[in-house]
Amino acid sequence: MIPPVIGYKRHFAKCKKNFMDNTFLPLTPILHPWVQRVIEQPTSLFQAIERQGSPINIHHLSPLKENINAYEKVLNKYQIAHKIFFARKANKCLEIARAVAQTGQGVDTASYRELQQCVEAGIDSEQLVLTAAVKNRKLLELTLQHDIPVVLDNEDELQLAQGVAQKKEKTMEVNIRVGGFFVEDKRLPTRFGFPIDRAIACISDLADKYPNLEYTGLHFHLNGYSVKERVAAIEQSVRVIDELLTYGIQTKSLDIGGGILMNYLQSEQEWLDFHKSLREAVLGTRSELTYQNDALGMVKINDQLYGEPTVYPYFNKLHKAKLLEEILTTRSAIFDVPIHQLFTERALEFRMEPGRSLLDQVGCTVAKVVFRKKDSEGRLLVGLEMNRTQLRSSSADFLVDPIHLPKQQNQKTDDPCYAYLVGSYCLEQELILKRKVYLKSYPEIGDLILFPNTAGYMMHFYESEAHLFELAKNIFV
Ligand SMILES: Cc1ncc(COP(=O)(O)O)c(C=O)c1O
């Protein structure tokens, strides 16, 4: 609707005010030294973009090894036999799977191609597991051919696995996925696995019903990041494991899946300030912080805000190895010993499948500035040669400040601006970040924008080739 002429001026003034009335609300990223070096000496980055096109994903394998070491250190401290399986779905580069395998740990695969590439790369079958949410005959034949354990989720999968193994007259090693754990008398809802209270019935029948399947372990993966829920899931799984033993059925391993938090941001205060200000902005008491005042998943009804932003907790204090240690040292209310003892007392192998948290600091995404313009309401838009599927997860936005790398190193820095970063898909919603960003200098065409810490999910999980744009190239420093 075209606003009436008199209202139009007011409308424009309001928009201008909304956009200009800014207080800088940073969300400062934690940067690994390798990223610092790239930022300080970006010449090779500019060259790489010229060679490979924009955007590119750059990776470094040192942080991956540091992250694995940190988990191993905790598990060794409590003398727990363990295997860490990197969840490949979080990043598709085979180099990462290979590097994990070289440390002696394993890879959790979720599709035929993920698994096949690992097999072809020579990764030992003992270092592989298949957890794919959907498994067809071809996939199970591949696992059987290479003696790779499979995590089975439902009765139909058990039947399919039995059929595949029987046909080849072989035994297939299987773990059983369980879910629906009880926390404070409420069931954790899930679409995955056998309900924990049905697990004994299912597994005790297995040898009779499915003679070509060999049960070796239990598996779960929980939505969310709660320590308490993971502790409850371990306790309830161990109860099943103990009862199975009374039927003479031994469980070699318990796999707790992934979902261990990582931390992207330096400052808790910045994180809290952003959330407080976002609420104010959406309620209209301060200037917008997100494009067209996007509430990032909160709902506004009659000047009331409901819910929380549906974003990853980019700042959190308890993460990675510390979070693992917190789980392992929590005292079990059921068994009255710390969780780590549940594993050591039973010689039960502890398995985990971290995806995102092993990729902390492993990669960045870098894109080239191609245009600057104003939208119809006066907001500065900076066009990047990339699309939003190349920086996307299930979080409503990636709440981490990007870094502006001017092409001219001596570009004057006294011309700061706020902008929205937009991409190449032909949608009004094609925002690379919904959040308004602050740039220390007005961007020039050919400058680069670096998004830090994107290796876990951000760069690959949702990437698409709409408009036939090529996928971003992945390079290793
Ligand atoms: C079965 C399973 N294991 C591991 C993971 C990895 O989780 P995260 O990347 O949060 O550690 C997932 C993620 O969806 C999963 O479904």
Image: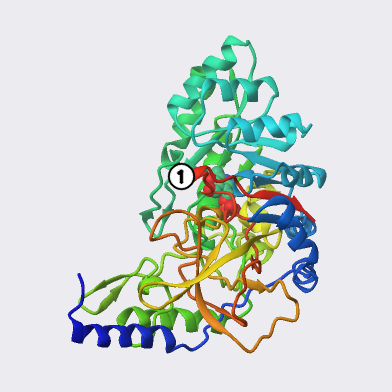
At x 73% / y 37%, what residue is drawn? 127
Which image quarter holds the N terminus?
bottom left
Depth check: 34 or 470 in front? 470
Residue 125 is drawn in which quadrant? top right
Residue 115 is drawn in which quadrant? top right
Disc count in the image? 1
Q: Relative to 379, is 6 on the left or the right?
A: left
Callout 1 secondary element: strand
Judge the density around disc 1: few (<14), some (14-19), many (≥20) Cα neighbours within 10 Å.
many
Q: Relative to 464, is 81 on the left or the right?
A: right
Q: Position of residue 373 (x, y in %)?
A: 48, 72
Q: Position of residue 310 (x, y in %)?
A: 42, 64
Q: Is residue 157 above or below residue 316?
A: above
Q: Is residue 325 above or below residue 248?
A: below
Residue 324 is drawn in which quadrant? bottom right
Residue 340 visible to an observer of this rendering: no
Residue 460 visible to an observer of this rendering: yes
At x 29% / y 75%, what residue is drawn? 305
Depth check: 431 or 59 in front? 431
Q: Is residue 337 above or below residue 272?
A: above
What is the residue that sits farthest to the left in this orientation? 4
Give the labeled residue for mark 1: 179
Depth check: 259 or 388 in front? 388
The color scheme shown is: rainbow
Q: Position of residue 438 (x, y in %)?
A: 55, 80
Three-letter code, disc 1: Gly
Q: Position of residue 296 (x, y in %)?
A: 40, 68
